């Protein structure tokens, strides 16, 4: 079963507007959430993260919101730029302890296209 | 430059012919992991390693082997590849303190015919 879901495979946004990427999860033990960005022919790169004790984290143009009661997180990109065109993966961790498998469970990805 | 390297980047092989995909990182990271990416399934963990000589199965370990004899290297071995192992493979590493900020290699596209 897919514990981390990204229901929109693709999204197109006009340059300068806001991009909103969504992610839902089912495992209530997840306590850390991340977004990774992937360009073609490259590996994913870490973008931004949020702990379950927070509901918002901001880094420049990127803001991640977490709604624990709805088991939902979103990534906002404002303003969107052509270089933001990529596949975005949502990921979550049910970090147990230092000696556990600090595993990330990834969603299926959303392809964001910024239209100039 | 801090990086994770994988070789080869592309490989076409036949069923049953043993192969190894190498992975190396130069960041002195304790944690290394292998993922496969398939359409509609996202990234799924195959194996991981917390440190030298410490490895364990991820979500989809069947048909794969790994070893961690040196901290910097984490090869993925397919003893008898099958067509269902055709996929895009990524190696990743991270420090023990910030395990979630994983650094990924560029990927290896494997086709098994």
Image (cartoon, coloured by chain):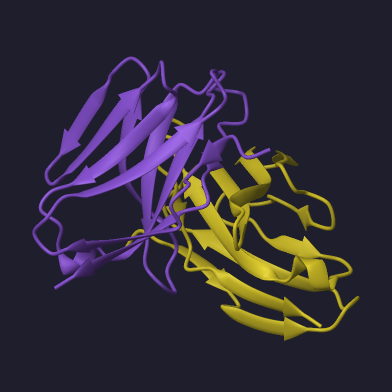
Chain colours: A purple, B yellow
Of B64 and B55, the residue lying toward us: B64
Of A19 and A105, the residue lying toward us: A19
Q: Is residue B107 left or right of residue A79?
A: right
Q: Position of residue A18 (x, y in %)?
A: 16, 50
- Residue beneath the point at 60% across and 78% down: B8
The reply to whether residue B100 is visible in this rendering is no
- Residue beneath the point at 54% across and 18% down: A28
Q: Position of residue A25 (x, y in %)?
A: 51, 31
Q: Quadrant of residue A65?
A: top left
- Residue beneath the point at 57% across and 19% down: A96
Q: Position of residue B37 (x, y in %)?
A: 60, 60
Q: Position of residue B96 (x, y in %)?
A: 47, 33
- Residue beneath the point at 80% across and 67% down: B84
Q: Quadrant of residue A90?
A: top left
Depicted B72 relative to depicted A15: above or below: above
Q: Quadrant of the C terminus of chain B?
A: bottom right
Of A47 and A28, the residue lying toward us: A28
Q: Is residue B51 left or right of residue A59?
A: right
Q: Quadrant of the N terminus of chain B?
A: bottom left
Depicted A107 relative to depicted A95: above or below: below
The reply to whether residue A112 is visible in this rendering is yes
Figure label count:
0
Q: Is residue A93 left or right of residue A85?
A: right
């Amino acid at each position: 079963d897919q514990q981390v879901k990204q229901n929109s495979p693709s999204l197109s946004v006009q340059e300068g507007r806001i991009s909103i990427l969504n992610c839902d999860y089912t495992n209530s033990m997840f306590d850390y959430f991340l977004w990774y960005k992937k360009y073609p022919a490259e590996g994913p790169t870490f973008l931004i993260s949020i702990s379950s004790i927070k509901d918002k984290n901001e880094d420049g143009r990127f803001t991640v919101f977490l709604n624990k009661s709805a088991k939902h997180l979103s990534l906002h990109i404002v303003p969107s730029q052509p270089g933001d065109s990529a596949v975005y993966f949502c990921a979550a961790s049910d970090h147990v302890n230092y000696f556990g498998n600090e595993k990330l469970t990834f969603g299926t990805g959303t392809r964001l296209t910024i239209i100039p | 430059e801090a990086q994770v390297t994988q070789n080869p980047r592309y490989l076409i092989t036949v069923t049953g012919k043993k192969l190894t995909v190498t992975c190396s990182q130069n960041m002195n990271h304790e944690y290394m992991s292998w993922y496969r990416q398939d359409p509609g399934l996202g990234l799924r963990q195959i194996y991981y390693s917390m440190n030298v000589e410490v490895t364990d199965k991820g979500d989809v370990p069947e048909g794969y082997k790994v070893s961690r004899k040196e901290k910097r290297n984490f090869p993925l071995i397919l003893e008898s590849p099958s067509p269902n192992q055709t996929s895009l493979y990524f190696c990743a590493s991270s420090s023990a303190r910030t395990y979630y900020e994983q650094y990924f290699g560029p990927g290896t596209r494997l086709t098994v015919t």
